[in-house]
Amino acid sequence: MMIIITLTIMIVILTYFVKINSVVHGQGVITTKDNAQLISLSKGGTIQDIYVTEGDTVKKGELLAKIVNLDLQKEYQRYKTQKGYLDKDVNEISFILDKRNEDGLISLDGVSSLSNKEVKANIELVHSQIRTKELKKNSLDSEIDGLQEKLNSKENELALLAEEINILSPLVKKGISPYTNFLNKKQAYIKVKSEINDIESSITLKKMISSWLLMTLRHLIMN
């Protein structure tokens, strides 16, 4: 009996000091710490329901818990209400855009039906700007037409003076016509020529302004 006990003690002592190189084979699933995922929320709240228990294996997209946040709910309702207003504005604006006239302008009758006061005021302001520039352009065009008629008249007058000067020139040299008459025609010719230059400059300037107004009008209408 003593021999058996002694052998047992020796085996235990030997196994303590001897390194075991044996490999045990088996089957199973190893769960590492890497599979653990820390869950955090950007905003706090009250947990209402939990759909998993500790240690459960979950898949991507699986609902884990339901959290109630009254502040978030209020914010969501506020954005939802704002979206409703914006949708209404978009629908109203789209409707009146479809009713634009052949010049691309929105009718003021359609604008009056808009519920968004800011949009309504902006459109009415653009209408006012367009109307002002249209009146200015129409006025300039009328002035240009008047100046063009005056220019034509002055050019005819200049042509007649030039013809008279050509007729008087040999008569003055022969002493048939007085020189003062010839001189008056020359002075009148120079004066009319100067007036024509002024009219042409004025027409050029007014046409430039009219072109700028037309470009501005197109920009206002397109935008």
Image (cartoon, rainbow, N blue to C red):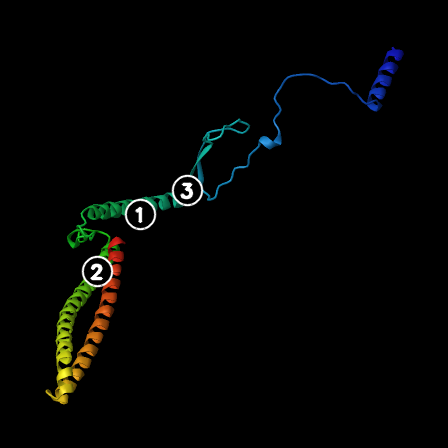
Give the alpha-carbon distance from disc 2 to disc 3, as whole Å. Answer: 51 Å
SS category of the residue bearing label 3: loop
Quadrant (top left, top right, bottom left, bottom right) of the C terminus: bottom left
Q: x%, y% of residue 148? A: 16, 69
- Mark 2 or mark 3: whose residue is earlier in sequence: 3
Q: Is residue 86 above or below residue 214?
A: above
Locate residue 65, reporting x and y percent: 45, 33
**Amino acid type shown at disc 1:** Gln
Task: Write down the residue under mark 1.
Answer: 82
Q: First in sequence, mark 2 or 1: give its number.
A: 1
Where, by quadrant of the figure, is residue 209 drawn? bottom left
| Mark 2, other Cα within 10 Å: few <14 / some 14–19 / many ≥20 | many
Who's the residue at 67% across and 16% down the image?
26
Q: Earlier in the sequence, mark 3 or mark 1?
A: 3
| C-alpha separation, residue under disc 3 versus residue under disc 1 | 20 Å
Residue that protrudes farthest toward the left in the picture = 176
The residue pinned by badge 3 equals 69
In this view, the residue in front, 1 or 43, is 43
